[in-house]
Amino acid sequence: MKIIHRKTMIMLLAGTVFVITAISALRTPAAEFNRENAVVKAVRKVSPAVVNISSESSAEDRQPPFTGMDPLFEWFFRDFFESNPRRQYQKNNLGSGVIIDGRRGFILTNAHVIFRAGKISVTLRDEREFEATIVGADPDSDLAVLRIDSKTRLPAAEMGDSSDLMIGEDVIAIGNPFGFSHTVTTGVVSALNRNIRANDAVYHDFIQTDASINPGNSGGPLLNINGVLIGINTAIYAKAQGIGFAIPINKASRIVADLIAHGEVPQTWIGVTVQGISEEMARYFNLPVRGGVLVKQVEPDSPAHAEGIQEGDIILSLRSIKIRSAGEFNAAMRGITAGEDVQIVLWRNGDSLKKTVKADVFPLDKAPELGYSLLGVKVKNSPSPKGHNKGAVITRVRPDSYMAEIGVQPGDIIRQIDEMKVENVQDFERAVIKYRDKGSVVILLQRGDRSYYISLRL
């Protein structure tokens, strides 16, 4: 009995020790993981440089002089009469931006965020608010640079390199979607060099990501896992769900340099004029693929001429972008900056050729002749450029032009071409260069005290 009692006691003691040990183990904290991962560090590093942009813009509705008219007449009055009654209202837009130069106060954002903006307010993470000025904007790339003045140096994002991005690598987006300040989303690089069509424009070389990018994120930074700026988010593709796009920072950097230096991106030029190819022409040239554009003119002393491009060549691709029409060629050219090497694939006499052409700034001395060729007019500065007399005064109208056909006369004043106001000959020449590849333009023409809108095919 004593032996059994002793064994029982030993077993009881062992069980008690086990229970106490188990309870102690439950009370001891488990090993904790470090929650301060790479994403947390990247966000903490860059968030102070991410800003909220609020722009107060003045919008107008032109009202026809008579209501209840046939739509054809409403169109006529809308396009040809500037003096129709207009309704003005204010519109607030929210977007994002990222400080790229803390010493000078430069902020990079999307052009559509500040489109037709009046007063622009910028709010930092620490709730400081500044009034911003526009340094320059480029609608073709959807990029803009703002500037704010601060007594102290501002936090700025570190500029990265988007040339070595890897599909599948982690990325982080920061912005203000729907007004929710400094929202962070994560994802991966889904694809590179994406071309998308949105708002009647074609945008090239986008980074595609599955990080959520919504209205308000536009202009905010896309970061790699180290918190380095690799792209500028844009929410221009309204149909996207679970798909975001960003402008590569290498492309943005070139455009930013032009915007800061010139206030705009100089129009690039390689010196070729192209036209689309019909099915009959494709059969005649025995093209192996559909698409392409015909080089119908090569300017002497142009970059294309220097590289041996000839009239009659067929351009099949530009910067690895397949070209199917003259419109696609012109859209692809708008995404090229001066000094950039442009890879072109040609078809000539049954052979495929590759050329590399360095794009240049369009020569200003060619603008007067270009204006006479496209618009059919020559112009001079107004002798009294004040008020309604500001503009480019027409001195000559080409007899076989559309301008002559509709009765435009010397002395009439061109005050606007599409979105660009024309106050002098230099403005006229810049507008002609900018819109030279469009199918048509709308011109605001003044004669005496009356103004007219004219739609002109180029």
Image: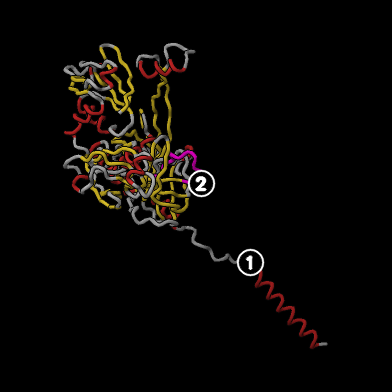
User: Which residue: 40% across, 21% down?
Assistant: 60
- Viewport quadrant of the N terminus: bottom right
The kind of residue on which mark 1 rests is: Leu
Q: Which mark is residue 26?
A: 1
Looking at the picture, how far across and down is residue 356, in whole percent? 25, 51
Magenta span: 232-243
The residue under label 2 is 242
On the picture, is 85 further left or further right than 313?
right
Name the N-terminal-most of marks 2 and 1: 1
User: Does 289 sit above or below residue 118?
Assistant: below
Q: Nearer the viewer, residue 126 or 296?
A: 296
Within 10 Å of disc 2 (Cα), the crowding (few <14, some 14-19, many 20+) is few
Q: Is residue 66 magenta?
A: no
User: Does 206 sit above or below residue 61?
Assistant: below
**Which of labels 2 and 1 is toward the front?**
2
Within 10 Å of disc 1 (Cα), the crowding (few <14, some 14-19, many 20+) is few
Residue extending furthest toward the right: 1
The kind of residue on which mark 2 rests is: Gly
Looking at the picture, how far across and down is residue 255, in whole percent? 29, 42
Looking at the picture, how far across and down is residue 39, in whole percent? 45, 55
Looking at the picture, how far across and down is residue 85, in whole percent? 40, 14
Q: Which element carries disc 1, helix, strand or loop? A: helix
Q: Which mark is residue 401?
A: none
User: Does 454 sit above or below residue 10?
Assistant: above
User: Which residue: 23% across, 46% down?
Assistant: 309
- Magenta segment's dominant SS is loop
